[in-house]
Image (cartoon, rainbow, N blue to C red):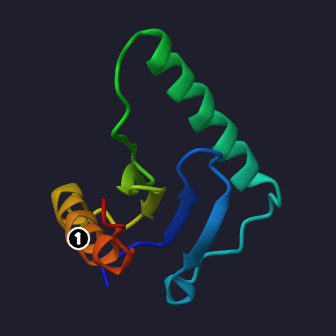
Amino acid sequence: MCGADEIVLFESTTFLVIANSEDKRAGKVAHGDSHRFEKISNIIKQFKLSCRKAQATFDGMMVQNSLFTSFFNLFTANTVIMIIVSDPAVEPEAIQLNIEGARAHFESLIPQTAS
């Protein structure tokens, strides 16, 4: 619904893929790299380690070029979401709003433990 070509959900500690979805209507060719999620996971883990060494916190990042915009954000308490959009008409701010809206919904699905 947000115009994404692909959405991937990672576990926030290990960065293992929990779920992924591609928009088949986009007419994109399937990715030929069967290890791409593992590579993405390793890149993000290294980036997080660099942030820790610099005593900086990691909440997310956006990478944009002429071909796509990619968002990588903390999503719920235990997940990180990656969204890839290739349509230049989709504004990055709209994707961020969609992430915020979806975050609230998914957090409400997580059982809260009483202290």
- Tell me: 79 left or right of 110: right
- Residue 14 in percent (x, y) is at 65, 46
Up the image or down, 55 lies above or below 15; here it is above
Please give the name of the residue rendered at 81% of the width and 54% of the height, measured from the top-left corner. 35
User: Where residue 61 appears, x then y in whole percent?
Assistant: 36, 40
Label 1 residue SS: helix
- Write down the residue under mark 1: 104
Left or right, 53 with reference to 14: left
Which of the two residues, 103 or 35, is positioned nearer the viewer here? 103
Does 4 appear above or below 17? below
Query: In which quadrant will I find the N terminus?
Result: bottom left
Q: Position of residue 34 (x, y in %)?
A: 83, 61
Residue 50, percent across and down?
52, 17
Instruction: Say which quarter of the image contains residue 13.
Output: top right
Q: Residue at x 40, y 72 (%)?
A: 4
Q: Residues within 10 Å of mark 1 (few under 14, many from 20)?
A: few
Q: How many discs appear? A: 1
Residue lying furthest top = 54
Q: Residue at x 33, y 39 (%)?
A: 59
| Amino acid on which disc 1 is placed | Ala
Query: Could you say which is closer to the camera, residue 26 or residue 80?
Result: 80
Q: Quadrant of the C terminus?
A: bottom left
